[in-house]
Image (cartoon, rainbow, N blue to C red):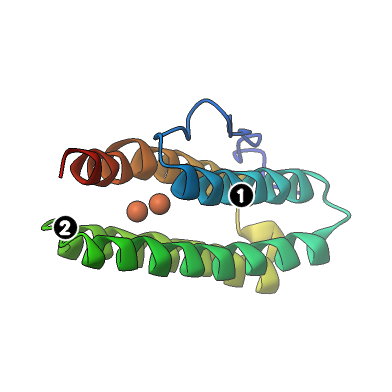
Amino acid sequence: MIPETDESPHFLDCVEAFRLGDETLDREHEALCLLINRLAAAIDDQAHWEEAVAIATELVHETHRHFGHEELLMRQAAYPELPQHHEQHTELLSQIESLRDRLATDHYLARPHQTLNFLGDWFTLHIDHSDRRFVEFRRDA
Ligand SMILES: [Fe+2]
Ligand SMILES: [Fe+2]
């Protein structure tokens, strides 16, 4: 059984919350958002832990790829806030990796909904604030 203190999963709104007006980044963010929602659904269905671990692993890889791409665009644009932005990416990625590892080794004690909700909120906030700042910087350059 999932501990009673765990929350139910929040499903993210992948259309409204992730529109920054940059076609490539918007597409990548939407794909990651859909993966987070798929992970929430798999975790909610306790019979499918292996699927949850597989989706979490895909989320780690896709997030890594997206961050690499976004930072490349930042270097090309000589974006001055790249170092701070990179730190946020590193922290976010390590949280996702740690969620994946806990799901893989200790399903029921991981309190996955709470962790996933925290990640989803943080992810949304990162895109809405930090990624948005970059998109606006590039637009105004
Ligand atoms: Fe970012
Ligand atoms: Fe991003």
In this view, the residue farthest toward the left is 80
Q: What residue do we see at 28% from left, 38% from top?
A: 129
Q: What residue do we see at 28% from left, 58% from top?
A: 88
> In the picture, residue 122 is in which quadrant?
top left
Q: Which mark is residue 79?
A: 2
Reading the image, the residue beneath label 1 is 31
Q: Residue 12's spot in the image, x, y percent?
A: 58, 33
**Closest to the observer: 55 or 26?**
26
Q: State the SS at label 1.
A: helix
Q: What residue do we see at 19% from left, 43% from top?
A: 137
Q: Residue 114's spot in the image, x, y percent?
A: 55, 44
Q: What residue do we see at 35% from left, 35% from top?
A: 128
In the depicted structure, whether residue 89 falls above or below residue 19: below
Regarding residue 119, the answer to whether it shows in the image is: no
Query: Dividing the image into 4 quarters, which one contains the C terminus?
Result: top left
Q: What kind of residue is marked 1? A: Ala
